[in-house]
Image (cartoon, rainbow, N blue to C red):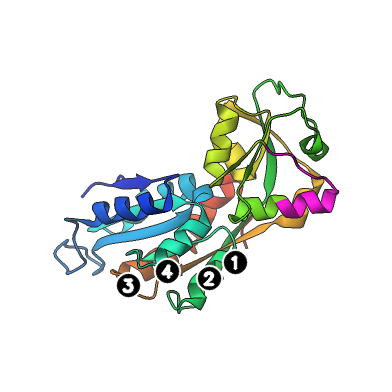
């Protein structure tokens, strides 16, 4: 047993998320007690989580493994809409953490989430520009100009839906050059200098460190995303799923989220 999260799946297409998680589960302890955990929780816990949770959940996964010897945490990170669809199609996930209630509701409606989800953090958007701000971006109004190269999340994922809300609040009609499947893909466009500006979460700007520059804007208050988490109804490892959800709601986890820039209840 190692205290490092065994496999991290990030920014994959929906089918790739499913296939990689299936491969990650192959050969793992199924939770039959053979792992020797002192608290009775063993095996693999597979967590499908919004891409914007990559850094924080990776940290929490390591902490959870340390607290529960005999448990391996496997993550599938991606756009919440794609992850929700994978769960509805039968992907063997234990826990789902979405970047918006809408995608969680889709899984509830399909009967794949039966225990009430709990909101554990909130997040808001921020403008991200390459270092040096080559496009001279100063605010949200610049997203309506034809000159800057702009990246946004796809409309069906939470960061894209939130972007639509803030543009409506600001009276700006954006002219994106690309719509990406999740927020990490959008951020990559900025760090590579392929676009002049993008809308990502505040936490992603902070996680990128000195690779990007963040610009706050007042309309972000109009579209704060609530993140719900819940165990999947047919979780292969329900005991570990319940324990992981409880850990995400703990004061220890709240410290990690706050440091990353999330709003906490």
Q: Position of residue 124 (x, y in %)?
A: 67, 50
Q: Which residue is mark 3?
A: 238
Disc nearer the start of the sequence (1/4): 4
The residue sitting at 62% across, 29% down in the picture is 212
Q: CA distance from mark 3 to mark 2?
A: 21 Å
Residue 172 belongs to magenta span:
yes
Q: Nearer the viewer, residue 223 or 80?
A: 80
The residue sitting at 31% across, 50% down in the picture is 20
Q: CA distance from mark 3 to mark 1?
A: 24 Å
Q: Which residue is mark 1?
A: 102
Disc nearer the start of the sequence (2/4): 4
Q: Position of residue 156 (x, y in %)?
A: 60, 56
Query: Quadrant of residue 175 in the image?
Result: top right
Crowd band around label 1 with a 10 angstrom C-alpha radius: few (<14), some (14–19), many (20+): some
Disc nearer the start of the sequence (3/2): 2
- Eyeballing the image, is 152 above or below 74? above
Q: CA distance from mark 4 to mark 3?
A: 17 Å
For label 4, the SS is: helix
For label 3, the SS is: helix
Query: Quadrant of residue 133 in the image?
Result: top right
Q: Which residue is mark 2?
A: 106
């Amino acid at each position: 047993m190692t205290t490092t999260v065994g496999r991290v799946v990030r920014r994959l297409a929906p089918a790739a998320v499913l296939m990689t998680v299936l491969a990650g589960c192959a050969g793992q302890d199924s939770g039959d007690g053979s792992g020797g955990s002192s608290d009775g929780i063993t095996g693999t816990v597979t967590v499908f989580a919004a891409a914007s949770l990559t850094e924080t959940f990776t940290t929490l996964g390591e902490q959870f493994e340390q607290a529960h010897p005999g448990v391996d945490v496997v993550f599938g990170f991606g756009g919440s809409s794609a992850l929700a669809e994978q769960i509805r199609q039968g992907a063997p996930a234990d826990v789902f953490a979405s970047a918006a209630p809408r995608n969680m509701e889709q899984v509830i409606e399909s009967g794949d989430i039966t225990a009430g989800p709990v909101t554990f953090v909130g997040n808001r958007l921020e403008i991200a520009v390459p270092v040096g701000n080559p496009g001279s971006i100063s605010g949200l109004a610049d997203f309506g100009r034809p000159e800057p190269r702009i990246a946004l999340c796809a409309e069906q994922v939470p960061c894209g839906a939130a972007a639509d809300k803030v543009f409506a609040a600001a009276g700006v009609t954006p002219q994106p050059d690309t719509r990406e499947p999740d927020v990490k893909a959008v951020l990559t466009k900025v760090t590579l200098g392929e676009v002049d500006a993008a809308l990502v979460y505040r936490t992603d700007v902070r996680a990128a460190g000195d690779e990007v520059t963040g610009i706050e804007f007042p309309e972000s208050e109009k579209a704060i995303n609530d993140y719900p988490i819940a165990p999947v109804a047919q979780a292969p490892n329900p005991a570990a799923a319940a324990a992981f959800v409880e850990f995400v709601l703990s004061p220890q986890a709240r410290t990690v989220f706050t440091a990353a820039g999330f709003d906490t209840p």
